[in-house]
Each structure stands twice: as C-alpha cells, then as structure tokens.
Image: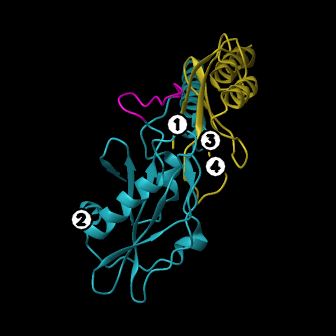
Chain colours: A yellow, B cyan
C-alpha cells in the first residue's frame, strides 16, 4: 500500500517534470512551427529582393509571440549584414523585416 | 517516513524542473556572432600599442582613407551603392596607414589577408555602411536598415583591434 502511494507521488512528479521541459520545434501553444516560420521568412526575403540568401545560414530565435528568423553569412570573415524576419507565432504573418549591414 | 519520502520526491521534482528551465537548457542555438578566421587571426602581431579606438579613428591618415572609402561607396546612388573598407596598420614608429580592401557588395565586404608593414601590426579596420538612411534607417525604397555595426561585423573583427563603421550620418561608430 505504501509503495503504491509513493508510486503515485513519483508519477505526479515525473508528469510535472515532463510538462516543464521545453520541446524543440514546438509552437509554444499552437500556431506555426519554427520550420514553417523559416519557410515564411525565406519567401519574404526572396520576394523583397534586397539580399540574396546564397552563402548564408539560417538561425531561429524563439521569442514570446514571434519567431525571429535571420540569415547570417556562412563565411566567418565576411563583414556585413543579414535579413531579419519576425514571424507571428499564431498567424504566421511577417510582422517585421529589416536588414543589417 | 511517508512524509519524508513525499518531501524528498517533491524536492527532487522541483530541482529537476529548475534545471529544465535553467538558461543552460533553454538557451537557443548561438546567434549570428561568428569568430574571426583563425587563419587570418594568426597573421596579426600581438598588440603592443596603447592607441585608443578614438585615437585610431581620429588619425589624419585613417580619416582621409575613410573619407575616400565613403566617396567610393557611391552612397547616393541607389543601384550602385556598396561597401568599402580596409585594414588599419601601425608601423614600428607608431604611424598609422591603411590598406584598402576590394570593393564589397551592397551590404557586405570581404577583407584581404592582412599585410602589415615590417615590424608593424594590424590595429584596426573600417568599412562603410551606405544603406542606412536617417532618421529611421529607411532607404528610398522604404527598406528598413538597422544602424551598424552588425553582429557579423563584430564577430569577424580581429580580436584586440578597433572596428570603425562610417555611415551617412557623418559620424563614426567604434566597436
């Protein structure tokens, strides 16, 4: 009986822990995934026509309400900027697009 | 005994939950900052000079080179504007000189391998930012540019040297 009681506590504890772990690629409560945000951001940059994405990598930062997707140069010696795109996590709308140089 | 078990398990859960949410676990992948190329970094001499970034930026030879680079950037031409830049060297006598880099692209530029004078060293670099427009950074086409230097600029700069960015505000930004 005592073992069962301990088991229940342990199960509750493990469940609580699992719920606290951030999941990679999750949507943070519904909406679009980081992978979808990258697709949206890539299209936005290509359509804007200011910077080519050749020779660049892709980075994503998980902000509270939006994904921050940007495309820094692959070359570590290149001085220069990158396109930065903020994608709304719920709607997938591009809420900001700016460039650094 | 039962109570102590519960306390132990509860404490364990809290501890693991705290670890799960600690910055070490939730930290995102590294951002845009990139390190200087080791192959290039190995070509610079150790710094033995105490010139401040302001002294470097205000040196007449450096100011003249930055002004020439800005003129060469064609900043007022929306279709041909591009970045220009160069290395700043200091010779054994403490004199500064500049070696320009090949012309860059609209918003980037690649340096030459540094070639300081005999007995000299790299003390800095500069480049132009022709896209940012005052007051809010938007260019003629309405594209939004952020005032530099960019994270890439900072990450690519050789350690221990001074970085200088010039833009159409007429001011220089040191980094």
Q: Nearer the viewer, residue B124 or B134?
A: B134
Looking at the rendered structure, the secondary structure element under dot 1 is: helix
Looking at the rendered structure, whether the residues under marks 4 and 1 are on a common chain is answered as no
A50 part of magenta stretch: no
Residue at 41 percent across and 54 percent down: it is B71
Q: How many other residues sit within 10 Å of disc 3, few (<14), some (14-19) or many (≥20)? A: few
x then y, percent, for residue A11 = 72, 18
Residue B174 appears left or right of B41:
left
Residue with the mark numbered 3 = B29
Looking at the rendered structure, whether the residues under marks 1 and 3 are on a common chain is answered as yes
x then y, percent, for residue B111 = 55, 64
Residue with the mark numbered 4 = A73
Tag shown at residue A25: none
Residue with the mark numbered 2 = B55
Residue with the mark numbered 1 = B23
Alpha-carbon span between mark 1 and mark 2:
39 Å
Residue A81 appears left or right of B174:
right
x then y, percent, for residue A91 = 67, 10
Q: Earlier in the sequence, mark 1 or mark 3?
A: 1
Residue at 67 percent across and 52 percent down: it is A74
Which of label 1 and label 3 is nearer to you?
A: 3
Of all residues, the one furthest to the bottom in this rendering is B118
Alpha-carbon span between mark 3 and mark 2:
37 Å
Looking at the rendered structure, whether the residues under marks 4 and 3 are on a common chain is answered as no
Alpha-carbon span between mark 4 and mark 1:
26 Å
Q: Chain of mark 4?
A: A
Q: Chain of mark 2?
A: B
Boundaries of the magenta span: B133-143
């Amino acid at each position: 009986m005592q073992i069962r009681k301990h088991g229940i506590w342990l199960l509750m504890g493990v469940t609580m822990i699992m719920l606290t772990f951030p999941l990679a690629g999750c949507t943070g409560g519904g909406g679009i995934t980081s992978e979808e945000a990258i697709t949206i951001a890539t299209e936005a940059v290509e359509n804007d026509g200011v910077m080519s994405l050749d020779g660049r990598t892709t980075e994503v930062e998980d902000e509270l309400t939006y994904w921050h997707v940007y495309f820094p140069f692959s070359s570590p010696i290149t001085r220069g900027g990158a396109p930065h795109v903020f994608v709304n996590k719920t709607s997938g709308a591009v809420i900001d697009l700016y460039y650094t140089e | 005994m039962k109570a102590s078990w519960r306390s132990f398990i509860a404490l364990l859960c809290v501890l693991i939950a705290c670890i799960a949410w600690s910055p070490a676990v939730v930290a995102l992948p590294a951002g845009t900052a990139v390190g200087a190329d080791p192959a290039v970094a190995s070509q610079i001499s150790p710094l033995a000079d105490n010139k401040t970034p302001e002294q470097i930026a205000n040196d007449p030879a450096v100011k003249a080179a930055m002004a020439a680079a800005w003129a060469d950037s064609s900043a007022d031409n929306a279709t041909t504007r591009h970045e220009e830049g160069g290395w700043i060297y200091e010779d054994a006598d403490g004199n500064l000189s500049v070696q320009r880099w090949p012309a860059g692209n609209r918003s980037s530029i690649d340096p030459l391998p540094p070639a300081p004078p005999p007995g000299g060293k790299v003390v800095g670099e500069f480049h132009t930012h022709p896209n940012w427009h005052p007051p809010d950074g938007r260019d003629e086409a309405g594209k939004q540019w952020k005032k530099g230097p960019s994270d890439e600029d900072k990450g690519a700069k050789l350690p221990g040297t001074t970085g200088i960015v010039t833009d159409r505000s007429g001011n220089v930004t040191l980094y």
